[in-house]
Amino acid sequence: MNPDDTNPTPNIITVHVNGQPLTVPAGSSLLQVLTHLTAGAEEVDSGRIATALNGQHIARGLRDQTLLTQGDHITTFEPITGG
C-alpha cells in the first residue's frame, strides 16, 4: 500500500500541491483549496490559474464540484494563450 493512500485522521486528508504536501479537511473541493492558497476566489475564477488533478485538466467550472481525496496531486500553472 502506498503511504499516501493511508489516512490516520479521517477528518483530515493530505494532498500535494505542486509537489508540496498540504493537509485539508476531508470533503474539500479543488476550488476551496485554490481559494485558500491564493489571494481569493477572484484570482482563481479570473482564469489566471489552470489546474490539473492527478494529471487530468480540471475546467474552471468544475472546480467546486471536484472533491479531493487522500493523496491527490494538484498542479497549478498559468494557462497558455496566444495565436
Image (cartoon, grey):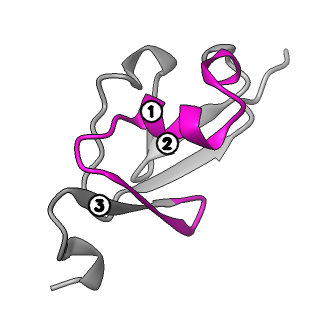
**Residue 75, placed above or below residue 57:** below
User: Measured from the top left, where is residue 12 in percent x and y?
Assistant: 27, 59
Quarter of the figure with residue 78: top right
Q: Quadrant of the N terminus?
A: bottom left
Earlier sequence position, callout 1 versus callout 3: 3
Instruction: Return the residue at label 2.
Output: 52
Identity of the residue drawn at 19% across and 69% down: 9
User: Measured from the top left, where is residue 6 in percent x and y?
Assistant: 18, 76
SS under mark 2: strand
Q: Look at the numbered discs 3 and 2 and tell me whether their residues touch, using CB distance below 8 Å.
A: no
Instruction: Return the residue at label 3.
Output: 13
Earlier sequence position, callout 3 versus callout 2: 3
Name the kind of residue labelled 3 in the image: Ile
Left/right placement of residue 21 relative to residue 5 reads right
User: Measured from the top left, where is residue 46 in percent x and y?
Assistant: 69, 14
User: Measured from the top left, where is residue 59 in percent x and y?
Assistant: 46, 22
Name the kind of residue labelled 1 in the image: Gln
Q: Which mark is residue 32?
A: 1
Earlier sequence position, callout 1 versus callout 2: 1
Is residue 34 a member of the stretch shown in magenta? Answer: yes
Identity of the residue drawn at 72% across and 31% down: 39
SS under mark 3: strand
